[in-house]
Amino acid sequence: MQNKTICPTRTSALLMCCLLCACGIKAQAQSEAHERAKQLGHNVSYKVEGQSTFSDHDSPLWLNANKYGLSSVSGNNGYIRVGAFRSTEADSAYNWKFGYGVDLAATYDFTSSFVLQQLYADIQYKKVRLSIGSKERPANLKNPLLSSGSQTFGTNARPIPEFRIEIPEYISLTGTSNWIGIKGHFGYGFFTDNNWKKGYTEPGKQYADHVLYHSKSGFLRFGNEDKFPLVFEGGIEMANQFGGIIHNYPRKGESLPMGHGIKDFIEIIYSGGSDPGEGVYANAMGNTVGSWLFSLSYKYKGAKLRVYYDHFFEDHSQLFFQYGWKDGLVGIELQLPKNRFISTLLYERIGTKDQSGAVYHDHTEAIPDQISAKDNYYNHGLYTSWTHWGLAIGNPLYMSPLYRHDGLLSFDNNRFIGHHFGVSGSPTEEIDYRILYTYTSNWGTYTAPYDEIKYGNSFLCEVAYSPKRIGKLRTQGWQAKAAFGLDRGKQTGSHTGFQLTISKTGWLTK
Protein backbone atom coordinates (compact mmCIF):
# COMPACT_ATOMS: atom_id res chain seq x y z
CA MET A 1 0.00 0.00 0.00
CA GLN A 2 1.29 3.44 -0.92
CA ASN A 3 1.82 5.78 2.05
CA LYS A 4 0.27 9.22 1.71
CA THR A 5 2.16 12.26 2.96
CA ILE A 6 0.16 15.16 4.35
CA CYS A 7 1.45 18.49 3.21
CA PRO A 8 2.32 20.83 6.11
CA THR A 9 0.78 23.74 4.21
CA ARG A 10 -2.51 21.93 3.76
CA THR A 11 -2.42 20.87 7.42
CA SER A 12 -1.96 24.45 8.53
CA ALA A 13 -4.75 25.58 6.26
CA LEU A 14 -7.05 22.85 7.65
CA LEU A 15 -6.27 23.79 11.25
CA MET A 16 -6.82 27.44 10.43
CA CYS A 17 -10.24 26.64 8.90
CA CYS A 18 -11.24 24.58 11.96
CA LEU A 19 -10.13 27.38 14.26
CA LEU A 20 -12.07 29.96 12.27
CA CYS A 21 -15.17 27.75 12.25
CA ALA A 22 -14.91 27.22 16.01
CA CYS A 23 -14.52 30.95 16.59
CA GLY A 24 -17.44 31.58 14.28
CA ILE A 25 -19.67 29.10 16.11
CA LYS A 26 -18.61 30.53 19.47
CA ALA A 27 -19.21 34.07 18.25
CA GLN A 28 -22.62 33.05 16.86
CA ALA A 29 -23.56 31.36 20.17
CA GLN A 30 -22.41 34.41 22.11
CA SER A 31 -24.33 36.65 19.70
CA GLU A 32 -27.50 34.55 20.13
CA ALA A 33 -27.10 34.55 23.91
CA HIS A 34 -26.50 38.29 23.87
CA GLU A 35 -29.54 38.83 21.64
CA ARG A 36 -31.66 36.65 23.93
CA ALA A 37 -30.44 38.59 26.97
CA LYS A 38 -31.42 41.82 25.20
CA GLN A 39 -34.84 40.42 24.38
CA LEU A 40 -35.59 39.62 28.02
CA GLY A 41 -36.07 43.32 28.54
CA HIS A 42 -38.14 43.74 25.40
CA ASN A 43 -41.92 43.62 25.07
CA VAL A 44 -42.43 45.17 28.49
CA SER A 45 -45.82 46.77 28.78
CA TYR A 46 -46.97 49.35 31.31
CA LYS A 47 -50.26 50.43 32.80
CA VAL A 48 -51.08 53.60 34.70
CA GLU A 49 -54.55 53.85 36.18
CA GLY A 50 -56.53 56.12 38.46
CA GLN A 51 -59.93 55.36 39.94
CA SER A 52 -62.40 57.22 42.15
CA THR A 53 -65.64 55.90 43.62
CA PHE A 54 -68.36 58.10 45.11
CA SER A 55 -71.27 56.54 47.02
CA ASP A 56 -73.91 57.76 49.43
CA HIS A 57 -73.19 54.89 51.88
CA ASP A 58 -71.06 51.77 51.33
CA SER A 59 -69.78 51.06 47.85
CA PRO A 60 -72.41 49.12 45.84
CA LEU A 61 -71.54 45.45 45.40
CA TRP A 62 -70.65 45.48 41.71
CA LEU A 63 -68.50 48.61 42.01
CA ASN A 64 -66.41 46.72 44.54
CA ALA A 65 -66.56 43.01 43.71
CA ASN A 66 -64.33 40.85 41.49
CA LYS A 67 -61.53 43.40 41.19
CA TYR A 68 -58.82 41.15 42.68
CA GLY A 69 -59.23 42.97 46.00
CA LEU A 70 -58.07 46.34 44.64
CA SER A 71 -61.30 47.92 45.83
CA SER A 72 -62.99 49.17 48.97
CA VAL A 73 -66.38 48.82 50.63
CA SER A 74 -66.08 52.42 51.84
CA GLY A 75 -68.45 54.79 50.10
CA ASN A 76 -65.78 57.18 48.82
CA ASN A 77 -62.49 55.63 47.82
CA GLY A 78 -59.87 55.60 45.11
CA TYR A 79 -56.39 54.68 43.99
CA ILE A 80 -53.54 55.48 41.64
CA ARG A 81 -51.93 52.39 40.16
CA VAL A 82 -48.70 51.82 38.22
CA GLY A 83 -47.54 48.52 36.76
CA ALA A 84 -44.99 47.02 34.37
CA PHE A 85 -45.33 43.54 32.88
CA ARG A 86 -43.59 41.13 30.58
CA SER A 87 -45.54 38.12 29.32
CA THR A 88 -43.97 34.75 28.61
CA GLU A 89 -45.62 35.07 25.19
CA ALA A 90 -42.81 37.45 24.29
CA ASP A 91 -40.58 34.37 24.10
CA SER A 92 -42.96 32.26 22.04
CA ALA A 93 -40.15 31.35 19.62
CA TYR A 94 -38.10 29.74 22.41
CA ASN A 95 -38.49 26.69 24.63
CA TRP A 96 -37.48 28.71 27.68
CA LYS A 97 -39.75 31.66 28.41
CA PHE A 98 -39.55 34.37 31.04
CA GLY A 99 -42.10 36.81 32.36
CA TYR A 100 -42.54 39.14 35.30
CA GLY A 101 -44.78 41.82 36.71
CA VAL A 102 -44.79 44.55 39.33
CA ASP A 103 -48.03 46.36 40.15
CA LEU A 104 -48.29 49.03 42.88
CA ALA A 105 -51.15 51.22 44.09
CA ALA A 106 -51.46 54.20 46.44
CA THR A 107 -54.99 54.25 47.84
CA TYR A 108 -57.39 56.16 50.07
CA ASP A 109 -60.16 54.64 52.20
CA PHE A 110 -58.86 51.12 51.55
CA THR A 111 -57.80 48.49 54.10
CA SER A 112 -54.25 49.80 53.56
CA SER A 113 -52.87 53.01 52.10
CA PHE A 114 -50.32 51.17 49.94
CA VAL A 115 -51.01 47.96 48.02
CA LEU A 116 -48.44 45.69 46.43
CA GLN A 117 -51.04 44.20 44.13
CA GLN A 118 -48.75 42.05 42.00
CA LEU A 119 -45.11 41.05 42.17
CA TYR A 120 -44.20 37.86 40.36
CA ALA A 121 -41.76 36.04 38.11
CA ASP A 122 -42.64 33.30 35.62
CA ILE A 123 -40.08 30.81 34.33
CA GLN A 124 -41.51 28.49 31.69
CA TYR A 125 -40.09 25.55 29.74
CA LYS A 126 -42.29 24.77 26.77
CA LYS A 127 -45.75 24.62 28.44
CA VAL A 128 -44.73 23.96 32.06
CA ARG A 129 -44.29 27.04 34.23
CA LEU A 130 -42.83 27.90 37.61
CA SER A 131 -44.65 30.98 38.92
CA ILE A 132 -43.46 32.76 42.06
CA GLY A 133 -45.21 35.65 43.79
CA SER A 134 -48.53 37.51 43.84
CA LYS A 135 -50.31 37.41 40.50
CA GLU A 136 -53.86 38.12 39.36
CA ARG A 137 -55.10 34.84 37.91
CA PRO A 138 -58.44 34.61 36.05
CA ALA A 139 -61.06 32.15 37.26
CA ASN A 140 -61.42 28.83 35.45
CA LEU A 141 -64.43 28.32 33.15
CA LYS A 142 -66.00 31.71 33.99
CA ASN A 143 -66.60 34.84 31.94
CA PRO A 144 -64.35 37.44 33.67
CA LEU A 145 -66.62 40.40 32.84
CA LEU A 146 -70.09 38.96 33.36
CA SER A 147 -69.95 36.04 35.79
CA SER A 148 -70.77 36.48 39.48
CA GLY A 149 -67.53 34.61 40.19
CA SER A 150 -66.06 31.22 41.07
CA GLN A 151 -66.72 29.76 44.51
CA THR A 152 -63.18 28.58 45.35
CA PHE A 153 -60.59 30.50 43.31
CA GLY A 154 -62.47 33.69 42.56
CA THR A 155 -61.24 37.14 41.60
CA ASN A 156 -62.77 39.02 44.54
CA ALA A 157 -59.82 39.22 46.97
CA ARG A 158 -56.18 40.25 46.70
CA PRO A 159 -53.82 37.69 45.14
CA ILE A 160 -52.14 35.33 47.61
CA PRO A 161 -48.34 35.09 47.16
CA GLU A 162 -47.62 31.59 45.95
CA PHE A 163 -44.86 29.29 44.76
CA ARG A 164 -46.54 27.11 42.14
CA ILE A 165 -45.83 24.72 39.30
CA GLU A 166 -48.46 24.95 36.62
CA ILE A 167 -49.58 24.04 33.14
CA PRO A 168 -51.52 27.25 32.43
CA GLU A 169 -52.84 26.22 29.00
CA TYR A 170 -54.03 22.83 27.84
CA ILE A 171 -51.36 20.37 26.69
CA SER A 172 -52.52 17.93 24.05
CA LEU A 173 -52.53 14.25 25.05
CA THR A 174 -53.41 13.14 21.51
CA GLY A 175 -50.62 14.72 19.50
CA THR A 176 -51.38 17.16 16.70
CA SER A 177 -55.08 16.20 16.63
CA ASN A 178 -55.43 17.95 20.01
CA TRP A 179 -58.66 16.13 20.91
CA ILE A 180 -57.79 15.71 24.59
CA GLY A 181 -55.95 18.29 26.70
CA ILE A 182 -54.82 18.59 30.30
CA LYS A 183 -53.86 21.51 32.52
CA GLY A 184 -53.50 22.24 36.24
CA HIS A 185 -51.31 23.54 39.03
CA PHE A 186 -49.82 22.74 42.46
CA GLY A 187 -48.63 25.39 44.88
CA TYR A 188 -47.92 26.70 48.37
CA GLY A 189 -48.24 30.25 49.62
CA PHE A 190 -49.10 32.48 52.56
CA PHE A 191 -51.68 35.10 53.50
CA THR A 192 -50.49 38.71 53.82
CA ASP A 193 -53.16 40.30 56.04
CA ASN A 194 -51.56 39.61 59.45
CA ASN A 195 -51.26 43.18 60.76
CA TRP A 196 -54.56 44.23 59.25
CA LYS A 197 -56.42 41.37 60.96
CA LYS A 198 -54.88 42.26 64.30
CA GLY A 199 -55.98 45.88 63.98
CA TYR A 200 -59.41 45.18 62.51
CA THR A 201 -60.65 42.32 64.69
CA GLU A 202 -62.65 43.32 67.74
CA PRO A 203 -60.52 42.91 70.92
CA GLY A 204 -60.87 39.46 72.40
CA LYS A 205 -62.39 37.96 69.25
CA GLN A 206 -60.78 35.06 67.41
CA TYR A 207 -58.54 35.53 64.37
CA ALA A 208 -55.60 33.75 62.74
CA ASP A 209 -52.35 35.19 61.44
CA HIS A 210 -49.24 33.90 59.63
CA VAL A 211 -51.58 31.45 57.88
CA LEU A 212 -50.15 29.21 55.15
CA TYR A 213 -51.87 28.32 51.90
CA HIS A 214 -51.96 25.29 49.63
CA SER A 215 -53.76 25.12 46.28
CA LYS A 216 -54.09 22.66 43.45
CA SER A 217 -56.23 22.03 40.39
CA GLY A 218 -56.56 19.65 37.48
CA PHE A 219 -58.64 19.92 34.30
CA LEU A 220 -59.34 17.80 31.23
CA ARG A 221 -60.66 19.01 27.89
CA PHE A 222 -62.35 16.69 25.39
CA GLY A 223 -62.83 18.11 21.92
CA ASN A 224 -61.21 20.50 19.49
CA GLU A 225 -63.29 23.54 18.61
CA ASP A 226 -61.41 24.00 15.33
CA LYS A 227 -62.46 20.51 14.15
CA PHE A 228 -65.75 19.80 15.93
CA PRO A 229 -68.17 22.29 17.53
CA LEU A 230 -68.82 20.41 20.81
CA VAL A 231 -66.22 20.72 23.61
CA PHE A 232 -66.35 19.43 27.19
CA GLU A 233 -64.13 20.67 30.02
CA GLY A 234 -64.10 19.46 33.60
CA GLY A 235 -61.93 19.36 36.67
CA ILE A 236 -61.41 20.13 40.32
CA GLU A 237 -60.00 23.03 42.34
CA MET A 238 -58.93 22.66 45.98
CA ALA A 239 -57.37 24.99 48.54
CA ASN A 240 -56.32 24.78 52.19
CA GLN A 241 -55.57 27.17 55.02
CA PHE A 242 -53.11 25.68 57.50
CA GLY A 243 -50.32 26.61 59.90
CA GLY A 244 -50.17 30.00 61.58
CA ILE A 245 -51.39 30.98 65.04
CA ILE A 246 -55.01 31.10 66.23
CA HIS A 247 -55.46 34.03 68.63
CA ASN A 248 -58.05 34.25 71.43
CA TYR A 249 -58.80 30.54 71.13
CA PRO A 250 -60.58 29.08 73.00
CA ARG A 251 -60.58 32.04 75.40
CA LYS A 252 -59.51 35.66 75.24
CA GLY A 253 -55.77 36.11 75.44
CA GLU A 254 -54.89 32.51 74.58
CA SER A 255 -53.14 31.42 71.40
CA LEU A 256 -53.00 28.08 69.59
CA PRO A 257 -49.92 27.46 67.38
CA MET A 258 -50.70 25.30 64.36
CA GLY A 259 -48.46 22.82 62.59
CA HIS A 260 -46.13 24.09 59.88
CA GLY A 261 -43.45 21.41 59.61
CA ILE A 262 -42.52 19.26 56.62
CA LYS A 263 -45.04 16.64 57.73
CA ASP A 264 -47.80 19.25 57.68
CA PHE A 265 -46.86 20.39 54.17
CA ILE A 266 -47.20 16.77 53.02
CA GLU A 267 -50.40 15.92 54.90
CA ILE A 268 -52.20 19.04 53.69
CA ILE A 269 -51.91 17.71 50.12
CA TYR A 270 -54.47 14.98 50.82
CA SER A 271 -56.25 16.79 53.70
CA GLY A 272 -54.86 14.38 56.25
CA GLY A 273 -53.63 14.88 59.81
CA SER A 274 -55.50 16.84 62.46
CA ASP A 275 -55.36 20.19 64.23
CA PRO A 276 -54.04 20.75 67.77
CA GLY A 277 -56.71 20.63 70.46
CA GLU A 278 -59.23 18.52 68.52
CA GLY A 279 -58.94 15.51 70.84
CA VAL A 280 -61.48 12.76 70.15
CA TYR A 281 -63.06 14.96 67.46
CA ALA A 282 -59.92 14.91 65.31
CA ASN A 283 -60.99 15.52 61.73
CA ALA A 284 -58.53 16.84 59.13
CA MET A 285 -55.84 19.46 59.28
CA GLY A 286 -56.67 23.05 58.39
CA ASN A 287 -59.56 24.45 56.40
CA THR A 288 -60.26 22.66 53.11
CA VAL A 289 -62.44 24.15 50.37
CA GLY A 290 -62.91 23.19 46.75
CA SER A 291 -65.08 23.03 43.65
CA TRP A 292 -65.92 20.62 40.88
CA LEU A 293 -66.19 22.57 37.62
CA PHE A 294 -67.75 21.42 34.36
CA SER A 295 -68.41 23.17 31.05
CA LEU A 296 -70.02 22.07 27.79
CA SER A 297 -69.87 24.41 24.78
CA TYR A 298 -71.23 24.32 21.24
CA LYS A 299 -70.02 26.65 18.51
CA TYR A 300 -72.10 27.31 15.40
CA LYS A 301 -71.65 29.93 12.67
CA GLY A 302 -70.03 32.64 14.78
CA ALA A 303 -72.20 31.95 17.84
CA LYS A 304 -71.26 29.92 20.90
CA LEU A 305 -73.51 28.45 23.58
CA ARG A 306 -71.97 27.25 26.84
CA VAL A 307 -73.48 25.71 29.98
CA TYR A 308 -71.38 25.25 33.10
CA TYR A 309 -71.57 24.04 36.69
CA ASP A 310 -69.59 24.97 39.82
CA HIS A 311 -70.16 22.63 42.78
CA PHE A 312 -68.59 23.94 46.00
CA PHE A 313 -67.61 21.73 48.93
CA GLU A 314 -66.15 22.22 52.42
CA ASP A 315 -63.85 19.48 53.75
CA HIS A 316 -65.03 16.10 52.40
CA SER A 317 -68.79 16.36 52.95
CA GLN A 318 -69.72 17.00 49.33
CA LEU A 319 -66.45 16.11 47.67
CA PHE A 320 -68.27 13.08 46.30
CA PHE A 321 -71.95 12.07 46.23
CA GLN A 322 -72.51 10.89 49.82
CA TYR A 323 -74.83 13.79 50.67
CA GLY A 324 -75.95 14.69 47.18
CA TRP A 325 -75.07 17.77 45.15
CA LYS A 326 -78.02 19.99 45.97
CA ASP A 327 -75.91 23.16 46.11
CA GLY A 328 -74.04 24.71 43.22
CA LEU A 329 -73.76 27.41 40.59
CA VAL A 330 -75.34 26.67 37.21
CA GLY A 331 -74.68 29.05 34.34
CA ILE A 332 -75.55 29.52 30.69
CA GLU A 333 -73.62 31.85 28.38
CA LEU A 334 -74.46 32.80 24.80
CA GLN A 335 -71.90 34.56 22.61
CA LEU A 336 -73.65 36.03 19.59
CA PRO A 337 -72.25 36.59 16.08
CA LYS A 338 -70.52 39.93 15.76
CA ASN A 339 -73.02 42.78 15.86
CA ARG A 340 -73.31 46.33 17.20
CA PHE A 341 -75.77 45.64 19.99
CA ILE A 342 -75.15 42.56 22.17
CA SER A 343 -72.03 40.41 22.23
CA THR A 344 -72.72 38.10 25.19
CA LEU A 345 -75.71 37.13 27.34
CA LEU A 346 -75.25 35.29 30.64
CA TYR A 347 -77.43 33.87 33.39
CA GLU A 348 -76.33 32.13 36.62
CA ARG A 349 -78.32 30.52 39.39
CA ILE A 350 -76.43 29.87 42.62
CA GLY A 351 -77.86 27.94 45.56
CA THR A 352 -76.13 27.27 48.90
CA LYS A 353 -79.03 26.42 51.25
CA ASP A 354 -78.44 22.68 51.75
CA GLN A 355 -74.80 22.42 52.96
CA SER A 356 -75.16 18.61 53.41
CA GLY A 357 -78.11 19.10 55.75
CA ALA A 358 -79.00 20.89 58.98
CA VAL A 359 -77.81 18.35 61.58
CA TYR A 360 -74.15 17.66 62.33
CA HIS A 361 -72.70 14.97 64.58
CA ASP A 362 -69.02 14.09 64.88
CA HIS A 363 -68.17 10.53 65.84
CA THR A 364 -67.32 9.55 69.43
CA GLU A 365 -66.49 6.27 71.14
CA ALA A 366 -70.07 6.07 72.38
CA ILE A 367 -71.63 6.96 69.00
CA PRO A 368 -69.24 6.00 66.20
CA ASP A 369 -71.55 7.13 63.40
CA GLN A 370 -70.74 10.50 61.84
CA ILE A 371 -73.05 12.89 60.01
CA SER A 372 -71.07 15.57 58.19
CA ALA A 373 -73.70 18.25 57.72
CA LYS A 374 -73.91 22.00 58.54
CA ASP A 375 -70.91 22.66 56.32
CA ASN A 376 -71.09 26.38 57.14
CA TYR A 377 -69.65 27.54 53.83
CA TYR A 378 -66.72 30.02 53.96
CA ASN A 379 -66.61 29.83 57.81
CA HIS A 380 -64.23 27.76 59.92
CA GLY A 381 -63.87 27.06 63.62
CA LEU A 382 -60.15 27.90 63.72
CA TYR A 383 -59.31 30.03 60.66
CA THR A 384 -62.55 32.02 60.96
CA SER A 385 -63.32 32.44 57.26
CA TRP A 386 -62.31 31.99 53.63
CA THR A 387 -61.21 35.60 53.23
CA HIS A 388 -58.13 37.66 52.41
CA TRP A 389 -58.01 41.23 53.67
CA GLY A 390 -61.65 40.87 54.74
CA LEU A 391 -63.03 40.00 51.30
CA ALA A 392 -64.41 36.62 50.22
CA ILE A 393 -61.76 34.80 48.20
CA GLY A 394 -64.45 33.12 46.11
CA ASN A 395 -67.84 34.36 45.00
CA PRO A 396 -68.80 37.86 46.29
CA LEU A 397 -72.48 36.89 46.68
CA TYR A 398 -71.25 35.44 49.96
CA MET A 399 -71.41 38.96 51.41
CA SER A 400 -67.91 39.79 52.67
CA PRO A 401 -67.45 40.47 56.41
CA LEU A 402 -66.14 43.99 55.69
CA TYR A 403 -69.66 45.11 54.81
CA ARG A 404 -70.75 44.59 58.44
CA HIS A 405 -68.17 47.00 59.93
CA ASP A 406 -68.27 45.12 63.25
CA GLY A 407 -64.69 43.89 63.67
CA LEU A 408 -65.64 40.26 62.95
CA LEU A 409 -64.30 38.17 60.10
CA SER A 410 -66.98 35.46 59.86
CA PHE A 411 -69.81 35.30 57.32
CA ASP A 412 -73.24 35.87 58.84
CA ASN A 413 -74.99 34.75 55.64
CA ASN A 414 -73.95 31.73 53.59
CA ARG A 415 -77.36 30.19 52.87
CA PHE A 416 -78.88 31.93 49.88
CA ILE A 417 -80.31 31.54 46.40
CA GLY A 418 -79.16 34.02 43.79
CA HIS A 419 -80.12 34.84 40.22
CA HIS A 420 -77.47 36.72 38.27
CA PHE A 421 -77.72 38.28 34.79
CA GLY A 422 -75.05 39.80 32.58
CA VAL A 423 -75.02 41.53 29.18
CA SER A 424 -72.09 42.98 27.25
CA GLY A 425 -71.57 44.54 23.85
CA SER A 426 -69.48 46.82 21.64
CA PRO A 427 -71.60 49.36 19.73
CA THR A 428 -68.45 50.72 18.09
CA GLU A 429 -64.77 49.81 17.96
CA GLU A 430 -64.12 52.40 20.67
CA ILE A 431 -67.05 51.79 23.04
CA ASP A 432 -67.77 48.71 25.18
CA TYR A 433 -70.43 48.21 27.82
CA ARG A 434 -71.60 45.67 30.36
CA ILE A 435 -74.70 45.43 32.55
CA LEU A 436 -75.05 43.21 35.64
CA TYR A 437 -78.09 42.54 37.80
CA THR A 438 -78.32 40.17 40.75
CA TYR A 439 -81.25 39.19 42.94
CA THR A 440 -80.72 37.12 46.12
CA SER A 441 -82.88 35.54 48.84
CA ASN A 442 -80.90 35.06 52.05
CA TRP A 443 -81.44 32.86 55.12
CA GLY A 444 -78.32 33.61 57.25
CA THR A 445 -76.53 30.49 58.56
CA TYR A 446 -77.74 27.25 60.13
CA THR A 447 -76.22 28.33 63.45
CA ALA A 448 -77.67 31.86 63.35
CA PRO A 449 -80.60 31.98 60.89
CA TYR A 450 -82.31 35.23 60.01
CA ASP A 451 -85.71 35.88 61.61
CA GLU A 452 -87.07 36.45 58.12
CA ILE A 453 -85.78 36.07 54.59
CA LYS A 454 -83.70 39.05 53.51
CA TYR A 455 -83.67 40.06 49.87
CA GLY A 456 -80.97 41.86 47.94
CA ASN A 457 -80.73 43.60 44.57
CA SER A 458 -77.49 44.74 42.98
CA PHE A 459 -77.12 46.54 39.65
CA LEU A 460 -74.22 47.77 37.52
CA CYS A 461 -74.02 49.68 34.25
CA GLU A 462 -70.51 50.32 32.94
CA VAL A 463 -69.32 51.99 29.73
CA ALA A 464 -65.71 52.03 28.54
CA TYR A 465 -64.41 54.46 25.92
CA SER A 466 -61.07 53.63 24.24
CA PRO A 467 -60.49 56.28 21.55
CA LYS A 468 -57.84 55.76 18.91
CA ARG A 469 -57.74 59.44 18.06
CA ILE A 470 -59.40 62.62 19.30
CA GLY A 471 -59.12 65.23 16.58
CA LYS A 472 -55.48 65.29 15.53
CA LEU A 473 -54.33 63.87 18.87
CA ARG A 474 -53.44 60.18 18.91
CA THR A 475 -54.91 58.53 22.02
CA GLN A 476 -53.93 54.91 21.49
CA GLY A 477 -53.89 53.05 24.83
CA TRP A 478 -56.06 55.54 26.71
CA GLN A 479 -59.34 54.42 28.22
CA ALA A 480 -62.05 56.16 30.25
CA LYS A 481 -64.55 54.01 32.09
CA ALA A 482 -67.69 55.21 33.85
CA ALA A 483 -69.83 52.94 36.02
CA PHE A 484 -73.08 53.38 37.92
CA GLY A 485 -74.03 50.92 40.65
CA LEU A 486 -76.76 50.51 43.22
CA ASP A 487 -77.89 48.06 45.90
CA ARG A 488 -81.38 47.74 47.31
CA GLY A 489 -82.86 45.40 49.93
CA LYS A 490 -82.42 44.40 53.56
CA GLN A 491 -79.52 42.07 52.77
CA THR A 492 -77.38 44.53 50.82
CA GLY A 493 -78.67 47.80 52.23
CA SER A 494 -79.39 50.86 50.12
CA HIS A 495 -76.28 52.09 48.30
CA THR A 496 -75.94 54.23 45.18
CA GLY A 497 -72.60 55.06 43.65
CA PHE A 498 -70.61 56.21 40.66
CA GLN A 499 -67.13 55.15 39.63
CA LEU A 500 -64.70 56.77 37.18
CA THR A 501 -61.56 55.02 35.94
CA ILE A 502 -58.94 56.47 33.59
CA SER A 503 -56.04 54.33 32.38
CA LYS A 504 -53.16 54.37 29.91
CA THR A 505 -51.43 51.28 28.59
CA GLY A 506 -48.50 50.98 26.25
CA TRP A 507 -45.02 49.56 25.72
CA LEU A 508 -41.92 50.53 27.63
CA THR A 509 -39.80 48.62 25.12
CA LYS A 510 -40.46 46.84 21.85
Image (cartoon, rainbow, N blue to C red):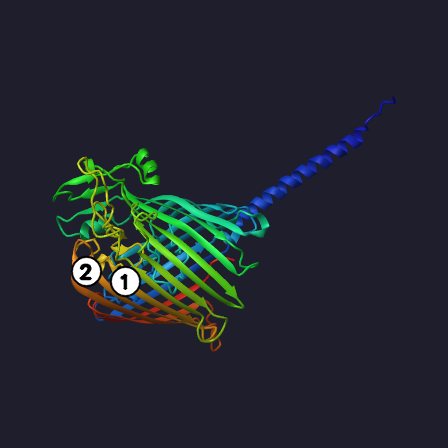
Mark 1 vs mark 2, CA separation in Å: 20 Å
Say what secondary structure mark 2 lies in. Answer: helix
Up-down relation of residue 73 to residue 498 (above or below): above
Label 1 with label 2: CB-CB less than 8 Å: no
Q: Residues within 10 Å of mark 2 (few under 14, many from 20)?
A: some
Question: To which residue does mark 2 refer?
Answer: 404
Left of 381 or right of it: where is 69?
Answer: right
> Which mark identifies residue 140?
none
Residue at the (40%, 44%) spot, across then down: 186
Residue at the (38%, 65%) spot, across then down: 146
Give percent across and percent down for residue 266. Answer: 34, 36
Q: Residues within 10 Å of mark 1 (few under 14, many from 20)?
A: many
Give percent across and percent down for residue 296. Answer: 45, 58
Front label number (1 vs 2): 1
Which badge, 1 or 2, is on the more N-terminal residue?
A: 2
Give percent across and percent down for residue 45. Answer: 46, 58
Give percent across and percent down for residue 164. Answer: 40, 44
Task: Mark yes or no: residue 54 visible.
Answer: yes
Question: To which residue does mark 1 refer?
Answer: 417
Residue furthest top in the image: 1
**Quarter of the rendering containing residue 393:** bottom left
Task: Mark yes or no: residue 278 visible.
Answer: no
Residue furthest bottom in the image: 471
**Quarter of the rendering containing residue 343:** bottom left
Say what secondary structure mark 1 lies in. Answer: strand
Residue toward you, 463 or 303: 303
**The disc labelled 2 sits on which kind of residue?**
Arg
Residue at the (47%, 70%) spot, across then down: 336
